[in-house]
Image: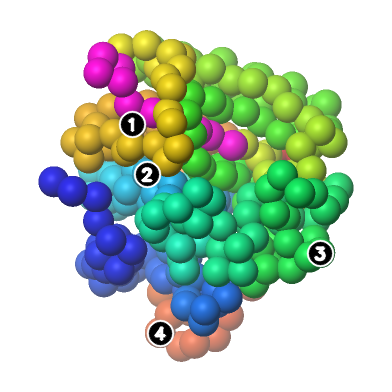
Amino acid sequence: MLYRSRDELFALYDDLVSSHRLIATKSIIGTTVEGRSIPMYKFGNLQGGKILLDSTIHGEEDMGGEIFLLYARWILESTDPDAIAIRNGNCTMIIPCLNVDRYDIGTGEGYGRRNAHDVDLSRNFTYRWEASTDKYKGPSPASEPETQALINIFKNEKPIFYLNSHNGDRAYFAVYSDNSSRRTYAQQVYSKIVAEAQKRGIVTYGLSLNTAYNNPGLAVCDADLEGINSFLIEWDCWTTTPSDPLTDCNWVGHPAKPPFSSIQNYYFPRWLPIGIVWSRECAIPREWYPGYYIRWLLDRISGRDFLENFPIMAKQEHKT
């Protein structure tokens, strides 16, 4: 099977929403330079603990959208007890593609990476933005509509965890924060991720600790400013024997994608312990489930905002 086009991928996300209308929604969070819609999907308990996952901030790096499609389907349809718990206790928000105009068109150096204004979106965010000649960061911080759309999600949705995903040229998973308590918390949570991975017989990613101060212009740094536990992942490249997830490989120019079969057989299983543990960390209490669905159904039928004052997670306060 081949990688899907942008429209094919979006259609599959749309199908999930159509098939699970009580626990899945689609919204448009903004438009691109060329006027295309940027969709975001929510899965599970729409008032549950929020996790935000994005992909393809660089147009040629589309593995995340495929991995998160499998994750969304697992949340909605799996009988795994962890999937059921996430379905009931969490709101998983997925932006399959931020750089919609340049999805998977890496035909020349930097062309697929940047947006239609030739701006590297991953260097266009506000925190310590500075002009540079090495990677075009835009004429000003958050100059691009795609950047503005994601910043608005940070401010309005305030997820507890955020993952900015890249194809990458090596296996890399890192927290970005200037807040020492968030870095400490990331280490504590990571120990649980390792335990979950071992339970499932999976070798997951190592964790790096980075400050936002030394990484100007990144999406994760703006998310950190909002008090969000913010991480960046590079799924890593494919080798002929991908037994060591920490082994680098050499890519020349635009990286060749791994076989599509590896998305389900290799990359999705390595992501799963991270998603499971993050969801446990911010799930709403089990005793709130029935009340949520009753209120949500009334909201849906009447159009009134019954959920406006619905309590969101007692556990949030100490996560920042």
Q: Residues within 10 Å of mark 4 (few under 14, many from 20)?
A: few
Whole-percent x, y for residue 6 in the image = 33, 63
**Are the residues at dot 3 and dot 2 in contact (C-beta closer than 8 Å)?**
no
Alpha-carbon distance for marks 2 and 4?
A: 37 Å
Q: Earlier in the sequence, mark 1 or mark 2?
A: 2
Q: Is residue 230 visible?
A: yes
Q: Amino acid at mark 3?
A: Ser
Q: Residue at x 47, y 68 (%)?
A: 101
Residue with the mark numbered 2:
63
Whole-percent x, y for residue 121 in the image = 63, 56
Alpha-carbon distance for marks 3 and 4?
A: 44 Å
Residue with the mark numbered 4:
301
Q: Amino acid at mark 1?
A: Tyr
**Are the residues at dot 1 and dot 2 in contact (C-beta closer than 8 Å)?**
yes
Judging from the image, the colouring scheme is: rainbow
* Nearer to us: label 4 or label 1: 1
